Amino acid sequence: MSHVNAGEAIGLDLGRRVVEYDDGDAILYALAVGARASELELVFERDLRVLPTYGLALGLWAPDELGPRGFYDIAQALHGAQRLDVFEPLPPRGRLELAARVSNVWDKGAAAVFEVEVGCRQFRATYSIFAPGSGGFGGERGPSAARDPERAPDLTGRAETTTDQAALYRLTGDRHLIHIDPAAAQAIGQPRPILHGLCTLAVVVRELAALRGAHPCDLSELAVRFSAPVLPGESIELRTWDEGAGPLRFAAATARGTVLSGGSVAFA
């Protein structure tokens, strides 16, 4: 497949989209990322608070806009990293106008990394998409990925996933076949359908909030690199480093290896 010169995407306006959701959608999202029935603020409409990471699901349409425009093959592209800055809480039900643009494109040689920024009054999300075959256009290589501290973690924890979690999470909007179809998963070298990276991240953030003694809805900023997929049902080990002032550093791994790296998270 031939691609449009990736450098031409820098600054590209991807348009606006109005997304609507109700309390049932927000509750479904919370359940899909592991919320328990006892967490009433997440699963009961009476005093509902919406997990800030739901914004990442609402904005996921934007990076997919680059595929039909010829910048990369969606089937080959990988979600490489994610950033989220939270400005104010998501309402229990809402009608949000999201504006999207390509904030930068980095030339990694054999691949390009597209940074797609999606924003509204409540949040700004930046999706980093690693696109094989789209590099070599003569652009800047970009910053190096954040590294985890080399010392032992200050605190560890564990997050659990369920065997049915990908099937449930895809109802929040991401219906890519690799999360449900065994043949599609095997075609990308996975033994079975994989958990959505954004689902893994939301599961981990909820547990990080618990480790921090914070409410997950008080998330204020988040950044992470996706290193490898999680298989539904796997247990995830969390490693955190407290560097005093500033965000908490974190990484996550399954028995098969690191799945999230270079992470930082802060709660208000």
Image (spheres, rainbow, N blue to C red):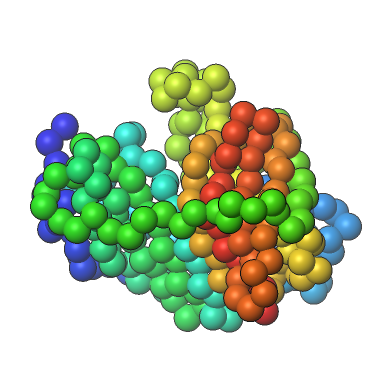
The image shows residue 156, relative to residue 97, as above or below, that is: above
The image shows residue 17, relative to residue 121, as above or below, that is: above
Of 61 and 195, which appears nearest the observer?
195
Where in the figure is residue 132, as x and y percent of width and height? 27, 38
From the viewer's perspective, tell me whether residue 39 is left or right of residue 244.
right
Q: Residue at x 45, y 21 (%)?
A: 189
Q: Residue at x 55, y 53 (%)?
A: 148
Of 139 and 126, which appears nearest the observer?
139
Total numbered labels? 0
Where in the figure is residue 19, as x and y percent of width and height? 46, 65
Asked where in the image residue 2 lies, by quadrant, the reply is top left
Where in the figure is residue 222, as x and y percent of width and height? 55, 65
From the viewer's perspective, tell me whether residue 248 is left or right of residue 57.
right
Q: Residue at x 67, y 60 (%)?
A: 241
The furthest residue to the right:
38
From the viewer's perspective, tell me whether residue 179 is left or right of residue 188.
right
Q: Quadrant of the C terminus?
A: bottom right
Of 236 and 142, which appears nearest the observer?
142
The furthest residue to the front:
151
Q: Quadrant of the N terminus?
A: top left
The image shows residue 73, relative to residue 64, as above or below, that is: above
Asked where in the image residue 232 lies, by quadrant, the reply is top right
Q: Residue at x 84, y 64 (%)?
A: 40
Where in the figure is residue 174, as x and y percent of width and height? 49, 45
Of 245 and 68, which appears nearest the observer?
245
Please indicate, yes or no, whether residue 56 appears anywhere in the rendered image: no
From the viewer's perspective, tell me whether residue 196 is left or right of residue 117.
right
Please indicate, yes or no, whether residue 138 appears anywhere in the rendered image: yes
